[in-house]
Amino acid sequence: MTTLATPQTEVPDRTSIQLNRLTGLGGLAFIATAFVTLGGEFFSDDTPKEVVAWVQAHPTQIAVNGLQIGLQMCVMALVLGRLVWLSGDRGALRTIALGAIVANVGVAWAEVGTYFGLADAGQRGGGDGAVMALFSLVRQMTFCDGFLFGVSAAVASALCLRASVLPRTVAWLGVLLGVFKVVELPVQLAATGTPDGVTGPVGTVLLLVWLLATSVTLLVRPRRG
């Protein structure tokens, strides 16, 4: 007599569940620390003299903020890398996503170096021209990681959508976020001629909403993957 085999559902082991929860906690930590960065000072209308005075008065704060950015990007890499792993994909999309994640971390730590350089110039009482040049570099570096992050977020979310790692709404939100970040800078440049504008805050809101939903999913439903 022939018997039909019953499909087996793979159950994640304890380590996988703990990693999912750790990733979720990392995402929530990213959100919490996102509200304590400097940010605003680099996009103010202060005069060059006011900028130089501020830099010279806050070198430690600037350096700490730079380090925070680098660590935040490492956490984001953990979240995206974990999603790619949970999708189970072993093809070209996985390679693209992981490559973009690694490259994005590299750009982030290059940005950290500009923060350290600005902090050092302020601490040493560097000339106004040197401080302003580094200040402008730090400001412009904030726009340099959007494309790579967008590629990694879009591909990772698409893999999660295909493998049902995340709820469909959250996965589609991740795809939307990724596409938005990829086109964000060209659209902003075409619209205003400068890299900063309304697209920045919109992208930030999308990022925080998606990351919150993803982190909560990994915490509350760690077996989903």
Image: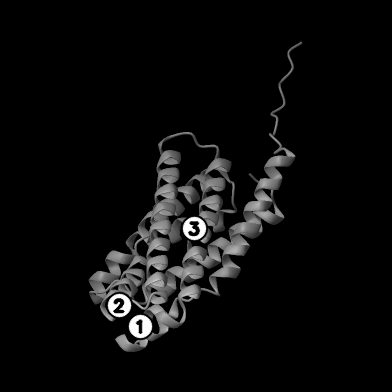
Residue 63, position in %: x, y?
Answer: 47, 69
Q: Secondary structure at mark 1?
A: helix
- Marks 2/1 in contact by CB < 8 Å: the verdict is yes
192 relative position to 98: left or right: left
Q: Are marks 3 and 2 in contact (CB under 8 Å)?
A: no
What residue is at 55 percent from the left and 67 percent from the top? Answer: 209
Pointer 3: residues within 10 angstroms few (<14), some, or many (20+)?
A: many
The residue at 32%/71% (across/down) is 134
| SS at circle 2 | helix
Q: x, y percentage for residue 162?
A: 52, 44
The quarter holding residue 125 reads bottom left
Tags 1 and 3 touching, CB below 8 Å:
no
Ranked by sequence position, the earlier of labels 1 and 3 is 1
> Which residue is the site of mark 3?
73
**Disc 3 to disc 2, how far (Cα)?**
26 Å
- The correct choice, above or below, for 101 with respect to 134 in the image is above
> Position of 16 compared to 181: left or right?
right
**In the orientation shown, which residue stands out farthest toward the top?**
1
